Amino acid sequence: MRYTVSGIAAIINAEVIHLHTDAVTEHLLFDSRRVFSPSASLFFALSGERRDGHTFIPELYQRGVRQFVISRDIDTARYPESAFLKTSNTLQALQQLAAHHRGQFSIPVIGITGSNGKTIVKEWLFHLLHEDFQIVRSPKSYNSQIGVPVSVWLMDHHHSMGIFEAGISKPGEMERLEKIIRPTIGVLTNIGDAHSEGFADKNEKLNEKLKLFSRAAVIIHNGDDKRITAAVAKTGKKSLSWGKSETCDVRMVSVERKSLTTHITLDLSGRQQGTESGTFTIRIPFTDDASVENAVTCCCVMLYLKAPFEKIAERMKLLAPVNMRLELKKGINHCTVINDSYSADLQSLHIALNFLQLQNTGTAKTVILSDFLQSGLSDEELYSRIAAELMAHRVSRVIGIGNNIATYLKFEDKASVITRISFYKTTEAFLQHFRFSDFKEEIILIKGARPFGFERIAALLEQKTHETILEINLNALVHNLKEYQRLLRPEVKTMAMVKAFAYGSGGAEIAGILQFHKTDYLAVAYTDEGVELRRAGIHLPIMILNAEPGAFDALTEHALEPAIYSMELLREFGSYLQKEGLRQYPVHLELETGMNRLGFPEKDIEPLCRYLKASGSFRIQSVFSHLAGSEEKKLDAFSRQQFVVFKKYCDQIEKTTGYSFLKHIANSAAIIRHPEMQMDMVRLGIGMYGTDVTASGQLNLEPVATLKSTIAQIRKVKAGESVSYSRSGRVDKDSVIATVRIGYADGYSRKLGNGKGKMLVRGRPAPVVGVVCMDMTMIDVTGIDGVEAGEEVIVFGKDLPAEQLAEWAETIPYEIMTSISQRVKRVYFLE
């Protein structure tokens, strides 16, 4: 399908404000951070609570985007080569365009909704059906008012089936999604408590979700759920129900769980016309209840599509876990590895390349790809698209494995940055030629179809470290950032604290995500931390809290902005700037208002003002101070006093300099407890990492970091025997003791020894026995059945918060987080 700008204007009933060229649109763009084919992209300037898409038009135009859908007046003279379409509501325009596009296809479309399991059912259906159909499906979990139209826009002439998921958060949303998806086959996974905030009760939520199927020929659902069965019956639609009840169309006769698999016997008994009748058994490589339900749901879809029993049974055996996250790991020779070695299709390639681009480390980008199987495109078109994706994401090196990729992947664009290309017929051939020295200081994406076994390549490239790891959930970080931002006035800026290795979570990786999500400022403690971020490709303004005279050269060379807290430091930095011939250098002034740590005290405000007025060396970016007890109610009066003093000092400085600057005093706790102190900017610290020091309940924070280790050995200890050094850990009964690969050299405090601390094994608490050793800690797993060497142990995370460890160790969460040793491997993942 080819859509010109003028054609799109007619579809969405937009006014053409300016039309330099009636170009063809291929990509719908709503996020200014994801521009890869600017000349063929149409940007919809969506407006949210905190950001207005119109403000990004100058940046996008500079990056080559020329087509825009807007809802407010724009000075088109600033954009002479552009096309502007004006409409009253840009989101509705996006949905209207996608709905029109959907209307051009008469292929079967499966629409999936429910409280849980939508994405897994979608991905499993893709793997079960992709040999029979050329399938377009929702990327990741794109099921929102924006995600659905972007997903449906991917439908193309070669597709013979669509699979899309739809999620809603309040009444009235599903009707809009139904017009876009128009499913011919409806799948309702379940109705639970997830995302219930916007609905009066489960009945309202169920009836709203069923609106997705108003034009569907059938609704597939759980027949054991009486509420769902009754609601589906009221729609008057044909249904295909599954469950244990005698009335279900597909009855689960038995569910037999083995150690690693589940055997499910199903009986149709001819209840559905057009499907086979009788009894047959499927085997799935999972044992949990959710997987059983999802697998039977997929089975019912295949039955409705008249797949024979034998084909269903054969393919069900090959179901694999749906990897809902991309992981970023340290690799050999200072490389970074993204392991996505179990799928190879155009949509997931685009997602993985986005994640690769997101890192923005400034290092070379290498992609290892296998043949792409059963795409429905000719080999020439398929690999032409792959080449375009690789070039658009500025990959510098490509390694192709497989017969087809070696034949058809070509880079003929002279502007391409791809400088190294190599091909191997098989994974085995690559492994035979593998040399550690061939990979150095690169970021490497490993992406291959399952039959190629790319996990063997990942094992070679990933850095070998001991089995204690700190998992960093980047989705949780972004979620927490947005949780705080929703409490802010729209104009208030955000400074993110990434000092102390981002509270132990990894400075450059965390800063990259914050930069992508357009945080306004970063702050670190020392200049070398800022230099590390600059070398990693971070271009946000960075405040240095503890600028040292010996680091002034590095500071100015990397455009870092020092916090000046004394007349001595001010004069010293001013002299340096004069010597270097630098004027109007950006600085931040720290004022002392009651913390008595660093900052200009009251007696220095007058001398400070005089110096600033006489000097042309500085440009004040911000003035700030620290609250001494913002999280404590008993100190509220003192916090308010600090705030009054701070405003007085700021007014005095502003009057002297004659220009305004950013003012900030609120930290994570003050955002919640003192909203009147937001001023121009707030500083987000440990709250961003999932710790609410106020325990207010106003925020739904998610822990960003999970510290895990493994059990090295299990031993039985008889009553009266001792464990660990000094024989301080004695057991009063026969016990089972597990030795865990973590100790105080990893940052696990010795204060947690002798029963004070606990770890989670199989979800159950196991107390520490004896003293914590340098590299090992012993825990009591008596009564936790079947624990074996090699099993995972949770040191802290969602079910055992760092706050709890801090309480046991008689310290604060800050110390727990920042004490984690650099030898502990960090693994970053994005769901």
Image (cartoon, helix red, strand yellow):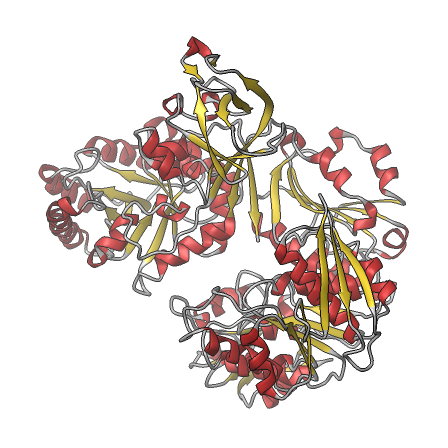
- Residue 557 horizontal/vertical position (percent): 44, 37
Residue occupying image coordinates x 25% and y 32%: 569
Q: Quadrant of the N terminus?
A: bottom right
Residue occupying image coordinates x 18% and y 37%: 595
Q: Is residue 809 above or below residue 399?
A: above
* Relative depth, front residue between 387 and 561: 387
- Residue 529 horizontal/vertical position (percent): 43, 35
Q: Is residue 207 visible?
A: yes
- Residue 445 horizontal/vertical position (percent): 69, 46
Left or right, 539 with respect to 228, comes to: left
Say which quarter of the image contains residue 278. bottom right
Left or right, 172 with respect to 383, comes to: left
Q: Is residue 581 above or below residue 100?
A: above
* Outermost residue to the top: 726
Left or right, 126 with respect to 172, comes to: right
Say which quarter of the image contains residue 523. top left
Q: Is residue 81 above or below residue 179?
A: above
Residue occupying image coordinates x 15% and y 52%: 647
* Relative depth, front residue between 806 and 472: 806
* Relative depth, front residue between 543 and 583: 543
Left or right, 80 with respect to 524, comes to: right
- Residue 240 horizontal/vertical position (percent): 70, 77
Q: Is residue 69 visible?
A: no
